[in-house]
Amino acid sequence: MEPLIEVQGLHFRYDSGPEVLRGVNFRLFPGESVALLGPNGSGKTTFVLHLNGLLRGEGLVRVCGLPTRPEHLPSIRRKVGILFQDPDEQLFMPTVLEDAAFGPLNLGLDPPRALHAAQEALALTGMSAAWHKAPYHLSAGEKRRAALAGVLAMRPEILVLDEPTTYLDPPGRRELADLLRRLPQAKLVVTHDATFACATTTRAVFFREGRIESEGPTAELIRRLGWDERLPPAEPAP
Amino acid sequence: MRHLVLEDWSRKESWLHARDPRAKLMAAVALLLAIGTSPAGSPSRLAGYALLLLAGVIIADLPVRGVWLRACVVLPFAGVFGVLAWLAGEPGRAAAVGVKSYLSAWTLVLLAATTPLPALLRGLASFGVPRFLLIVIQLLYRYLFVIAEQAHHMRLAAASRGGGFRLRSRQGWRAGAGAVATLFARSHARAEAIHRAMLARGYRGEFPLASPPRFGLGDALLSLWASAAAAALRLA
């Protein structure tokens, strides 16, 4: 099976700073949901920003067979939808509906079709009733769902979610996990939340110092690494 | 987060609120032109404009006193010119400057209190105001609330540690200056993140319009009636 995302030997540094990514190799297959775990500053967010060409490092990054070269970026950005950590940075249009329609309009859809796609995405995320609201009138959970609607309106094949549970209370996290499980896209979830990772993904990779240090089934990897404070770390193998 | 009173007013429902922003802009411009070009020494004419505006406030179901108070924002500026005219021996002109400035501010308060900013910007766009300028205003307005909230949190954090941004002490000045610098740095970083989020959703340098506004019979009636009333008062 062809991978949706294929990354080989990815290196990256910001300006003249230290190397943030130091040879990342990764594959995401259709239908998969993968958690990206790791300590703060381990390179997870930097890595996902490479997946639709927002950052470009040395090495191979291929999305649906297309390398992330400038001529392919419009197609790649249609296929990879990124939900950023802070929804205030993603909700920049005056109203929720206009924000959800921003992506489809940029894809070249005419206004009625773009609005239809936006309304569908808002319905999917349970935000239909707030279509006319300004983003600063929304609660944290509503902002997160409105931002997700903006991504889903572009009908991406791959969803990348960067710390999606930030600012959410436990019911909000549960609602988001339920919603993500219903979505058919392949998913890449950057998170520190072990419960959320177990609820939404089947495989996990662990980043440390710009490299993927280990990977495996989500629950098993989390237990092995002692990443869940509720569970004692597994005994090391003799 | 406390929102601007005008923002809350602009989301109310009334016949005036429901009108197309272009109709309200045309009516406001006609009224501003009439007020601005009215000669000094015509109190009955100025009273006529005030009655027109009062009718607008009542139709829009806005608090009259609140609108009057908000229009006072222009008085310190108008007062300077009024005093200069007074000192030059023209008390009639001094009074006219004050009253006309106040009526103009009232017109703009009424426009802003009956039209949410996004709709107002769409109206301005259809009159040919440069899109780039409107996008800057739109983003500034959108993130003003976010920055204000950050500033509020920083003030609370300072106050909870017994400090604050009181300008009476040197320490307060230092803390305030540090907060402003932090806000600036955060805003810069946020601007970069917003740009990334825009690129991720296919932004290529243009903000496409999702829903062009519609101009109906009620909108035509408003712009015609307000323009005719303003012109009649001006020429009377």
Image (spheres, coloured by chain):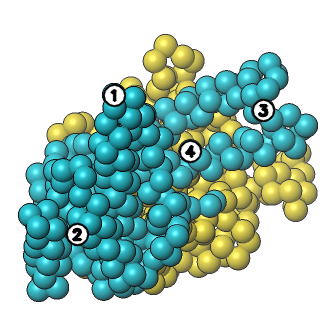
Chain colours: A yellow, B cyan
Where the N terminus of chain A falls, by quadrant?
bottom left
- Whether residue B143 is visible: no
What residue would you read off at disc 3? B166
- Amino acid marked by disc 4: Ile
Whether residue A80 sits left or right of residue A88 in the image: it is: left
Asked if the residue at tag 4 contacts the one at tag 2, i.e. Cβ–Cβ closer than 8 Å, the answer is no
x, y percent for residue B143? 48, 48
Where the C terminus of chain A falls, by quadrant?
top right
- Residue B147 is tagged as 4
- Residue B36 is tagged as none
x, y percent for residue A118? 32, 73
The image shows residue A50, relative to residue A76, as above or below, that is above
- Amino acid marked by disc 2: Lys
Chain hosting mark 4: B
Mark 1 vs 3, N-terminal side:
1
Chain hosting mark 2: B
Mark 2 vs 1, N-terminal side:
2
Asked if the residue at tag 3 contacts the one at tag 4, i.e. Cβ–Cβ closer than 8 Å, the answer is no
- Amino acid marked by disc 3: Arg
Q: How many marks overall?
A: 4
* Neighbour tally class for label 1: few under 14, some 14-19, many 20 plus, Cα within 10 Å: few
x, y percent for residue B69? 52, 60
Question: From mark 4 to mark 3, how far is it between C-alphas?
Answer: 20 Å
Mark 2 vs 4, N-terminal side:
2
Question: From mark 3 to mark 2, how far is it between C-alphas?
Answer: 42 Å
What residue would you read off at disc 2? B24
Q: Closer to the camera, A203 or A99?
A: A99
